[in-house]
């Protein structure tokens, strides 16, 4: 097991988001011999981001299975292995590369159970490091969750803290369906308290990360810490923000979101992926069609990535996706709208 | 046309005996079974066509009439616990893997008691307990999935072997090449069976690739590659048997090319504009069923009366299956979402 990177003052162990990914995999692999990890450079190299460092020594090359650069075949190998009762975790080096796996994931993994009349299941996790901020430009920074949202049969998870990484990844591994598990690359080094024991967070529960009366921000992945920071800044202006993290995008915990909006009457939906056709539109539609509609004091707002590929230049890259100051400005404006 | 894989010069080769030797090696019951399954496939598909013309079928279908020896010869080389994964032109493989023909017909007609409760239809018939891991409708998509099935067999230390059927068109996909490479480096117990029926929809293999034999693609992955006359059920069986034994004893994957011909169009929209009537007629002269009957009769395995009995029984099986399937209930939209996600 990985050593804790540090311990907080109250004695709770803290590890990083990346260490939480590693710990979840290691503990599940120890518990269940059917679980294995597969992907490019996951062996001696330790994975492109170091997630699988040390695993080869413990589990050997059969269960820490290095593959050639063959994303279609990796996804097929994972799908077929899952069909046979194994629980593969396939690592896609960058979420962008999942596009090469799409036929197997969308046409095979997502469909096999349904089109075979419920007589098979595909317990498969696709680990996909996503997101911008690393200067890796347009083909290594995408957040492609929306592509999977519209595919029945697939679940989509996007954790924001180390605690949730561990609990949601364990739940994803134990789930009997294909799960796309988005890991934000900028969050890998963030630390937080994580229990050493095994625990699962259900793939259906949002969490209210911060309570507030004036405005709800629905945010996931890296936009959660950014929204929380924005909320702290706006306290000084007397604006109390509630931050709701869906954690699992599909299935979506509509109830928690709707309840929060009923309470605050205002909602800002924040995500990194481009705004058009993004998850925010789905969340907005859910709110608009719910009882929360009657409580709305202002239109539903979305703050999301621009409709551009992620640029290389640092200034342009920051401008392409919501930053803390953008959330502060949008939330401030929405809190005052119509007052 | 059976070769010893000498074309795959950089890869290992298989030793394959003459198909006709099976006439002596196999028990009469097995040979009769092979003919019975070939006839059932032929009659199933003729019945499917008939039901379609009568307006009783929703959707399309892809008939393998003329290719029966490929499905039956391959499946005949398997143990009953071995597995298959196959493709949209899959009625033949399903019957050869001993599916319940009534449940198959029910699925074809979209009925609730069908193999997939009417969710899959002609292109997606699966019989998981029977070792048929399903047909895929996107050309070549079963090939990467087969790598995973083979991987699971290997990781579970199983002695089972998987046959992965696909067509000539699929061998031009990137997924084919990624998968054969992966199956090779991991020495997976998968026999890849390319049913070369000469056309990917309308595009002839002569136009879609510059190689004579698809089996030669095996040499890129250092696995055995063999081409066989896919209309000779005994030659197919002999070849696939050698391939299956190779895979079962842990040596790894094999690519087998069954050279055959699709008599009917690609699907129901096909007007056969890309080939001549003469070409179709010339292949009908090489009918795998007529040929196998002749072989059995000439070898003294069965007389014409016995052959006729098998034929009639197969026809009766299909007629009965269709009759029953037509009376079965339709699925209800009430539980349409039930099987999208597993509990």
Image (cartoon, rainbow, N blue to C red):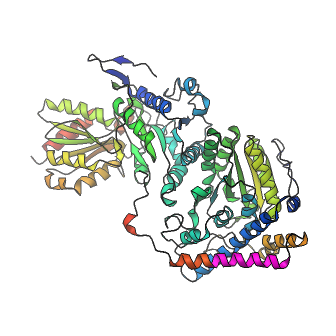
Give the quadrant of residue B115: bottom right
Tell me if A141 is positioned left or right of B85 in this view: left
Looking at the rendering, which quadrant does residue B26 occupy? bottom right
From this view, report whether residue A214 is shown above or below residue A225: below
Q: Is residue A210 visible?
A: yes
Q: Nearer the viewer, residue A73 or B101?
A: B101
In the image, which residues are magenta? B301-319
Q: Name the spot of residue B70 as percent of width and height, x first.
A: 74, 62
Q: Is residue B257 above or below residue A243?
A: below
**Residue B278, image quadrant:** bottom right
Where residue A307 appears, as percent x and y from the top left, is 38, 47
Q: From the image, which quarter does the N terminus of chain B lie in? A: bottom right
Q: Is residue A134 left or right of residue A192?
A: right
Q: Is B152 on the left-hand or right-hand side of A224?
A: right
Residue at the spot 77% in from the left edge and 69% down from the top edge = B35
Q: Nearer the viewer, residue B318 or A143?
A: B318
**Residue at position x 35%, y 51% from top?**
A276
Image label count: 0
| Most common secondary structure along the magenta stretch | helix
Could you tell me which residue is drawn at 21 percent across and 46 percent down?
Answer: A267
Residue A326: % across, % down: 26, 37
**Magenta stretch contains residue B245:** no
Residue B30: percent from left, percent from top: 78, 63
């Amino acid at each position: 097991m990985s050593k804790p990177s540090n311990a907080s003052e109250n004695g709770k162990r803290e590890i990083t988001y990346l260490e939480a990914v590693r710990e979840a995999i290691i503990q599940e692999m120890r518990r269940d011999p059917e679980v294995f990890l597969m992907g490019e450079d996951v062996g001696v190299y330790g994975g492109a981001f170091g997630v699988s460092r040390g695993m080869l020594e413990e589990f050997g090359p059969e269960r820490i299975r290095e593959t050639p650069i063959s994303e279609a075949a990796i996804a097929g190998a994972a799908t077929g292995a899952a069909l046979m009762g194994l629980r593969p975790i396939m690592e896609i080096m960058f979420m962008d590369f999942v596009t090469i796996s799409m036929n197997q994931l969308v046409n095979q993994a997502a469909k096999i159970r349904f089109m075979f009349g419920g007589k098979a299941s595909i317990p498969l996790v696709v680990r996909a490091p996503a997101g911008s901020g690393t200067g890796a430009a347009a083909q290594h920074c995408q957040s492609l969750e929306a592509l999977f949202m519209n595919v029945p049969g697939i679940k989509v998870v996007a954790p924001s803290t180390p605690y949730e990484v561990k609990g949601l990844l364990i739940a994803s591994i134990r789930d009997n369906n294909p799960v796309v598990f988005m890991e934000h690359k900028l969050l890998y080094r963030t630390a937080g308290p994580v229990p050493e024991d095994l625990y699962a967070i259900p793939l259906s529960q949002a969490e209210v990360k911060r309570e507030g009366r004036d405005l709800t921000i629905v945010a996931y992945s890296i936009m959660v810490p950014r929204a929380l920071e924005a909320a702290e800044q706006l306290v000084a202006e007397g604006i109390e923000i509630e931050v709701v993290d869906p954690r699992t995008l599909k299935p979506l915990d509509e109830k928690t979101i709707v309840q929060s909006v009923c309470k605050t009457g205002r909602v800002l939906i924040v995500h990194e992926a481009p705004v058009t056709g993004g998850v925010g539109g789905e969340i907005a539609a859910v709110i608009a069609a719910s009882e929360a509609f009657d409580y709305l004091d202002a239109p539903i707002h979305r703050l999301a990535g621009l409709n551009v590929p992620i640029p290389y230049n640092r200034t342009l890259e920051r401008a392409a996706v919501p930053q803390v100051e953008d959330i502060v400005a949008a939330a401030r404006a929405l809190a005052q709208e119509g007052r | 046309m059976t070769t010893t894989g000498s074309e795959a010069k950089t890869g290992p080769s298989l030793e394959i005996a003459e198909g006709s030797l099976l006439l002596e090696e196999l028990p009469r019951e097995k040979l009769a079974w092979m003919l019975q399954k070939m006839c059932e496939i032929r009659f199933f598909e003729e019945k499917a066509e008939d039901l379609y013309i009568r307006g009783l079928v929703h959707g399309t279908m892809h008939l393998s009439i003329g290719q029966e020896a490929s499905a039956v010869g391959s499946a005949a080389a398997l143990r009953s616990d071995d597995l298959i994964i196959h493709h949209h032109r899959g009625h033949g493989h399903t019957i050869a893997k001993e599916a319940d023909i009534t449940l198959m017909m029910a699925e074809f007609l979209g009925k609730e008691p069908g193999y997939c409760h009417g969710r899959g239809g002609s292109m997606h018939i699966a019989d998981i307990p029977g070792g048929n891991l399903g047909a895929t409708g996107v050309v070549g998509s079963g090939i990467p999935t087969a790598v995973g099935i083979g991987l699971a067999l290997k990781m579970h230390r199983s002695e089972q072997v998987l046959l992965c059927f696909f067509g000539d068109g699929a061998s031009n996909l990137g997924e084919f090449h990624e998968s054969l490479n992966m199956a090779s480096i991991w020495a997976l117990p998968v026999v890849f069976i390319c049913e070369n029926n000469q056309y990917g929809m309308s595009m002839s293999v002569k136009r879609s690739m510059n190689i004579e034999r698809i089996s030669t693609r095996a040499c890129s992955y250092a696995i055995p590659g063999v081409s066989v006359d896919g209309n000779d059920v005994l030659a197919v069986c002999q070849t696939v048997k050698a391939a299956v034994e190779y895979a079962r004893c842990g040596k790894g994957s094999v690519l087998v090319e069954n050279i055959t011909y699709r008599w009917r169009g690609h699907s129901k929209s096909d007007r056969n504009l890309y080939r001549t009537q003469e070409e179709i007629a010339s292949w009908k002269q090489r009918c795998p069923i007529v040929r196998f009957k002749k072989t059995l009769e000439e070898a003294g395995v069965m007389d014409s009366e016995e052959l006729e009995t098998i034929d009639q029984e197969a026809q009766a099986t299909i007629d009965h299956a269709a009759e029953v399937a037509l009376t079965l209930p339709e699925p209800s939209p009430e539980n349409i979402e039930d099987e999208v996600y597993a509990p």
